[in-house]
Amino acid sequence: MVSFPLQTGRSATRIIAIANQKGGVGKTTTAVNLAACLAAAEKRTLLLDIDPQGNATSALAIERDATPAVYELLTGEVKVSEAARPTSAPGLDLVPAGDRLVGAEVELATSPRREVRLKEALSAGLEGYAYILIDCPPSLGLLTVNALVAAHAVLIPLQCEYYALEGLARIMDAVRLCRTRLNPGLEIEGILLTMYDVRLNLCEQVEQEVRRHFPREVFRTVIPRNVRLSEAPSFGKPVIMYDIRSSGAESYLRLAKEIIDGAAQGPR
């Protein structure tokens, strides 16, 4: 198990979008479990579920139709403090997806300042949080754009498979475009290799290739394929509350420590 020494890190809230336009790469798994591990490290954390599928919401045992939710946040009907609710993980709050989020992209398409709605919603009232994580949809639509505009950095989960680099190139292009037009301060928090199977040569080959192309951006931590990570959501718990001794829990604890240490050292 990873221990967390008490640190005096940055005082401002750090907003991290967890994004990849490809589905099934461990994005929501990372959002939920990283958020819980940061909270366990005494870094009060808020998780925003802006994926209309609402998987992060259900993974933390919050009803999918809970209100107020992200939709009301985007439309300015409520503040973060009114939409956030505590979870079973101490120190971790959640703004749920909610049913109305399904039609949000269509509504946003014709709205003024449609790319900055989330940034405006997160512009105040965050003093109590060290980290805000945003679980994005598996697309590069307006909800993901809102997350990239609101965030200080983007974390990119990357499954160790054949098409990984092709998908990575697309999300990196989206980040560069966002920097150019909407959020010049957007950083790469890191590229996270997920679903790593030590028995497969392919995983090792993908890891070597990604590290060769992005030597500074790839996290040291690698998330393994782990049955406990798959089981935990059905119990409405992050993996550290389901089986803290599992390899999945230990990996996300290491990732949280790596992010906290990285914040103290400055941007990648």
Image (cartoon, rainbow, N blue to C red):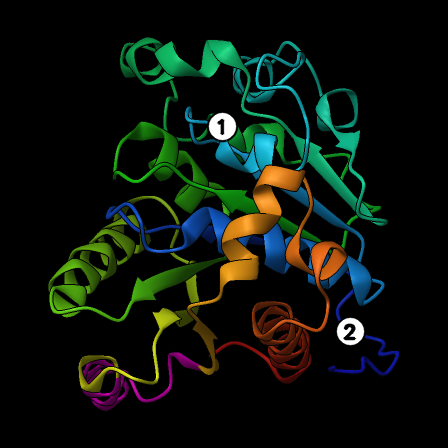
Q: What residue is shown at x 29% (from left), y 55% (from top)? A: 175
Residue pointed to by mark 1: 54
Most prominent secondary structure in the magenta stretch? helix
Q: Quadrant of the N terminus?
A: bottom right
Instruction: Bin the neighbour count of mark 2 within 10 Å (Cα to Cα): few under 14, some 14-19, many 20 and up.
Output: some
Q: What residue type is labelled 1?
A: Gly
132 to the left or right of 174: right
Would you say residue 1 is visible in this rendering? yes
Res. 200 mark = none
Going from N to C along the chain, the mark reached first, 1 or 2, is 2
Say what secondary structure mark 2 lies in. loop
Instruction: Bin the neighbour count of mark 1 within 10 Å (Cα to Cα): few under 14, some 14-19, many 20 and up.
Output: many
Tally of marks: 2
Placement of 96 over or under 67, stated as above or below? below
126 to the left or right of 132: right
The residue mark sitting in front, 1 or 2, is 1
- Asked where in the image residue 158 lies, by quadrant, the reply is bottom left
* Label 1 – label 2 distance at C-alpha: 31 Å
The residue stretch that appears in magenta:
204-219
Q: What residue type is labelled 2?
A: Gly
Would you say residue 14 is visible in this rendering? no
Image position, residue 196 (x, y; %): 36, 74
Q: What residue is shown at x 31% (from left), y 49% (from top)? A: 24
Placement of 108 over or under 213, stated as above or below? above
Image position, residue 6 (x, y; %): 88, 78
Q: Is residue 216 magenta?
A: yes
Residue pointed to by mark 2: 9
Say what secondary structure mark 1 lies in. loop
Image position, residue 106 (x, y; %): 29, 12
Image position, residue 67 (x, y; %): 66, 11
Q: Does the magenta stretch include residue 44?
A: no
Placement of 263 over or under 173, stated as above or below? below
